[in-house]
């Protein structure tokens, strides 16, 4: 027998369900004409979400345990080997209303959009935490441009010196070094930025101006 737990009535005018009950997964009956499909990948995503956040969205069923909404969650529960899941009974719907609502529940959610700027900001901040980013259902090809939109280049003072970054080392004999020093001083004197250039940056200019 299903266990019932009373929850606050949140449907305003008293219509619809007013309680959550835990029903054995084995007793739930999928709607034979459910037009919504669930891939193995999506079921795995739902299962991961349930494991991380809990089973927070009850399955909607009728008086005979037939599933009205939540087929994917039930499949994920089976994958997780859950014995029971929270359910809400919609006993106020006629058969025609149930069939229509099964479609409406899926389609209305698809009609929503995203505020790309806010989404990008939220994902960027979450990416700095220890949360598993795959739990939110976004594929890598979706996440990458959204995270890139909030990427900021490091400040100039935080950037490594080119010589340190590439690790190249050049040895000169005394005569060569005297020539290089003259060239470096000339680059510093000719460059508008003056002494702000590092030796490695000046060396790059030497190569560009004298070895090209």
Image: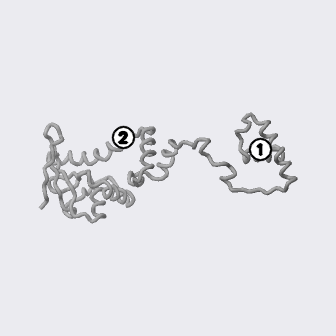
Which residue is identified by label 1? 205
Residue 89 placement (x, y as % from top left): 16, 51
Q: Describe residue 207's horizontal placement relative to residue 53 as left or right.
A: right
- Mark whose residue sits in front, 1 or 2: 1
Q: Residue at x 51, y 42 (%)?
A: 149
Residue 7 placement (x, y as % from top left): 15, 47
Q: Residue at x 16, y 54 (%)?
A: 21
Which residue is identified by label 2? 112
Q: Residue furthest bottom?
A: 81
Q: Is residue 66 above or below residue 159?
A: below
Among the 4 quarters of the image, the one containing residue 49: bottom left
Nearer to us in this view, 46 or 160: 160
Q: Residue at x 75, y 47 (%)?
A: 204
Residue 185 placement (x, y as % from top left): 80, 41
Q: Describe residue 190's horizontal placement relative to residue 152 as left or right.
A: right
Q: Describe the element under mark 2 as helix, strand or loop.
A: loop
Q: Residue furthest top?
A: 192
Residue 138 placement (x, y as % from top left): 42, 51
Q: Residue furthest right?
A: 175
Colour pattern:
one colour
Nearer to us in this view, 159 or 34: 159
Estimate the spatial distance between the alpha carbons at disc 1 and disc 2, rounded to whole Å: 54 Å
Q: Describe the element under mark 1 as helix, strand or loop.
A: helix
Label 2 Cα neighbours within 10 Å, binned few <14 / some 14-19 / many ≥20: few
Q: Describe residue 56's horizontal placement relative to residue 93 as left or right.
A: right
Label 1 Cα neighbours within 10 Å, binned few <14 / some 14-19 / many ≥20: some
Nearer to us in this view, 103 or 39: 39
Q: Is residue 190 above or below residue 59?
A: above
Q: Residue at x 71, y 44 (%)?
A: 198
């Amino acid at each position: 027998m299903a266990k019932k737990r009373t929850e606050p009535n949140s449907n305003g005018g008293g219509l619809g369900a007013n309680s959550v009950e835990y029903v054995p997964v084995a007793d739930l009956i999928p709607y034979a004409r459910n037009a919504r499909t669930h891939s193995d990948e999506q079921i795995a995503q739902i299962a991961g979400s349930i494991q991380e956040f809990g089973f927070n969205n009850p399955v909607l069923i009728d008086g005979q345990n037939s599933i009205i909404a939540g087929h994917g969650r039930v499949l994920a529960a089976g994958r997780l080997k859950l014995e029971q899941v929270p359910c809400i009974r919609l006993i106020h719907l006629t058969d025609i209303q149930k069939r229509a609502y099964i479609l409406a529940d899926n389609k209305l959610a698809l009609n929503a959009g995203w505020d790309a700027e806010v989404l990008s900001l939220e994902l960027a901040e979450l990416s700095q935490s220890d949360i598993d980013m795959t739990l939110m259902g976004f594929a890598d090809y979706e996440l990458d441009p959204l995270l890139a939109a909030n990427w900021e280049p490091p400040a100039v003072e935080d950037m490594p010196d080119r010589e340190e970054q590439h690790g190249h080392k050049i040895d000169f004999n005394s005569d060569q070094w005297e020539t290089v020093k003259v060239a470096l001083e000339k680059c510093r004197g000719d460059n508008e930025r003056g002494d702000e250039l590092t030796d490695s940056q000046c060396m790059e200019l030497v190569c560009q101006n004298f070895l090209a």
